[in-house]
Every structure is written in structure tokens, then in C-alpha cells.
């Protein structure tokens, strides 16, 4: 899976690519629209339900998000990743992110749920404090903000920007720039269907893998480290593991030389190099507004 930052998916106005890279052997991408079974509870807001109808404002909504995005945790993470930090540039970028979404609401291209504001803001701060994390908690951490500003185009619809795409409850939408289509990522449940392609991508929770060997796909309990495995079904070893010499084990780490996806812990080998299993919670677009680093 690609070490693509949370900011790149939710913060960038023109989101490109998939939220997560699929293993090499997957179903054909039909591009059909399907919503699936929502298996993730996006949580309840600390704000009263009647506040969901309040309109977003720069003074309140955008300032709260900028405060959450540009605090001490962000500065610390940027420094950890050797990206120059500039508080002013961070706040300008955060405000631009927010005001663009207010414009989308005004134009009827997105909706706004004020009851998610505080939950979303706290999620930003908490996840930035972790600085880097694996894909499933990365996806879970994005759910509240996906509902705060939510596009109106259904999965499978044509798009040019993530702000247009609708996130059904329990999912995160983005605009796949290669296909110019809205797609959503969500978590499946044990025994439930899963897939890495199409308009709705369903990922198994931690401790499970997507079994594509049967007539229908399903989330199965992952094999334990050291268990027997086959190179053709390496994803059975679970996230961040692969099949090494017939046993489930850590594969090659991010940055190591590889020949194919199955060698890498991330299941993704690009241009002869393994991608990292970790997603960065910041990049220069938020660390300094994209002006340096």
C-alpha cells in the first residue's frame, strides 16, 4: 500500500489515485456503483443533533479546523519527517481547504453537518500526534471528517475533485483521477464481502484478510506468523505480512528493492522499490502550505 498521506486524500482539493493500492490479483474493475453494507460506526458527536443544520462559517468552522490541523502535534510530526514547518503557511492551507468546501456547500455540490465539527477536529489532532500509521486505522480516523463536508456525487459518478464525492456513513470518498470517478473506501466485517476494485472498496479489519479464492469473496481470519502459506495467496498472511519461503512473515520494508508485489510487506512494488506500509499524517502541503520541503 502506498505511503500516501491523510492530507493528500482529505486535504488536497484534487485528490488523485486510490486510497490504498490493491494486491496484484484482484477482481476486474467494473466501475459500477454499489454502496455495500456499512460496517463502521463513525461515532456520535459531542454536539447536539440539532446543530447539524448550522451553516459552516470561516470564523467558526474554518478557525476550528485550522487550530486542529496546525498545532504542536503537526509541528512535531513535520520535524520528525524532516519537512520544514511554518505555522502561517499551515493555517493558510487549512483555511483554503475549509473555504473551498464552504463554496461547494453554497453551490449545492456538498453538504455540511456541524455535529461532526468537533469530532473531526479532534480526529485531526489525534491522528497527527501518531505521525505515521498503517492503513486500517488510517481509514478509520478519516470517517468523521468525511461526514463533515460531504459531496453529493454517488460512487461511480464522474468527478474532478474529492470535494464532489459522497461518503456514505462509514466510508471515505475520493476522486480517482486516473478513472475520473468517485470511489469510496470502507471496512467490511468478518465473513462479509470484500474487494479492492470497483466504485466501493471494502477492506477487511485488522486481523483478517480478503479471501478471493472462492466463488464469492469474504473476510477470513489471517494466518499466524510462521504458518504455511502459498505465494499465490500471500495476502492470507494479513496486513503488513506476506508469504516468505512458504511461511507467513514480514516481507521487504519500504524502500527495499523488489521484483513484484508479493515480496513487499506493503504488497506494492513500484519501479523496483517496495512502498511503505505506513501512511504519513502530514506532508508539505500542510506543514508549510507547500512552499518548501
Image (cartoon, rainbow, N blue to C red):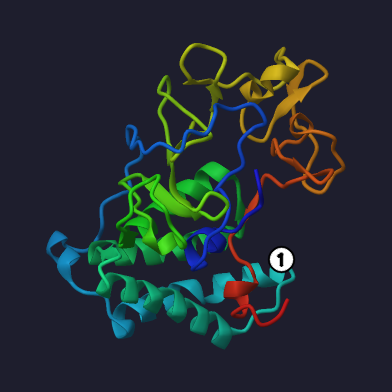
- Front residue of 119/189: it is 189
Residue 238 drawn at (x, y percent): 62, 28
Whether residue 254 is situated above or below residue 208 in the rendered picture = below
Q: Is residue 66 left or right of residue 227?
A: left
- Front residue of 192/130: it is 192
Residue 101 drawn at (x, y percent): 36, 71
Q: Is residue 270 left or right of residue 94?
A: right
What residue would you read off at disc 1?
81
- Front residue of 58/71: it is 58
Residue found farthest to the right: 257
Whether residue 84 is situated above or below residue 258 in the rendered picture = below
Q: Is residue 273 left or right of residue 208?
A: right
At horizontal 71% and vertical 73% (from top left) the residue drawn is 83
Residue found farthest to the left: 50
Residue 13 drawn at (x, y percent): 49, 68
Q: Is residue 278 left or right of residue 12?
A: right
* Count of labels in the image: 1
Whether residue 190 is situated above or below residue 177 in the rendered picture = above
At horizontal 42% and vertical 50% (from top left) the residue drawn is 172
Crowding at dot 1, Cα within 10 Å, few <14 / some 14-19 / many 20+, comes out as some
Q: Quadrant of the N terminus?
A: top right
Amino acid at each position: 500500500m502506498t505511503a500516501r498521506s491523510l492530507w493528500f486524500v482529505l486535504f488536497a482539493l484534487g485528490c488523485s489515485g486510490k486510497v490504498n493500492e490493491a494486491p496484484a490479483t484482484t477482481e476486474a474493475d467494473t466501475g459500477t456503483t454499489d454502496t455495500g453494507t456499512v460496517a463502521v460506526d463513525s461515532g456520535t458527536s459531542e454536539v447536539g443533533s440539532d446543530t447539524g443544520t448550522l451553516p459552516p462559517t470561516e470564523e467558526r468552522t474554518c478557525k476550528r479546523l485550522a487550530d486542529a490541523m496546525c498545532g504542536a502535534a503537526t509541528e512535531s510530526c513535520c520535524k520528525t519527517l524532516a519537512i520544514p514547518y511554518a505555522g502561517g503557511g499551515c493555517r493558510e492551507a487549512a483555511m483554503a481547504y475549509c473555504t473551498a468546501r464552504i463554496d461547494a456547500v453554497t453551490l449545492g455540490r456538498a453538504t455540511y453537518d456541524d455535529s461532526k465539527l468537533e469530532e473531526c477536529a479532534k480526529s485531526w489532532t489525534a491522528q497527527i500526534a501518531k505521525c505515521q500509521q498503517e492503513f486500517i486505522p488510517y481509514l478509520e480516523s478519516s470517517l468523521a471528517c468525511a461526514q463533515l463536508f460531504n459531496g453529493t456525487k454517488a460512487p461511480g459518478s464522474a468527478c474532478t475533485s474529492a470535494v464532489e464525492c459522497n461518503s456514505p456513513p462509514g466510508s471515505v470518498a475520493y476522486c480517482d483521477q486516473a478513472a475520473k470517478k468517485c470511489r469510496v473506501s470502507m471496512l467490511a466485517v468478518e465473513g462479509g464481502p470484500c474487494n479492492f476494485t470497483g466504485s466501493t472498496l471494502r477492506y477487511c479489519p485488522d486481523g483478517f484478510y480478503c479471501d478471493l479464492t472462492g466463488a464469492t469473496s469474504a473476510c477470513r481470519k489471517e494466518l499466524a506468523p510462521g504458518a504455511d502459506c502459498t505465494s499465490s495467496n500471500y495476502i492470507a498472511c494479513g496486513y503488513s505480512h506476506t508469504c516468505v519461503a512458504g511461511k507467513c512473515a514480514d516481507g521487504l520494508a519500504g524502500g527495499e528493492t523488489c521484483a513484484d508485489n508479493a515480496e513487499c510487506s506493503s504488497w506494492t512494488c513500484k519501479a523496483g522499490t517496495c512502498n511503505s506500509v505506513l501512511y504519513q499524517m502530514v506532508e508539505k502541503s500542510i506543514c508549510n502550505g507547500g512552499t518548501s520541503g
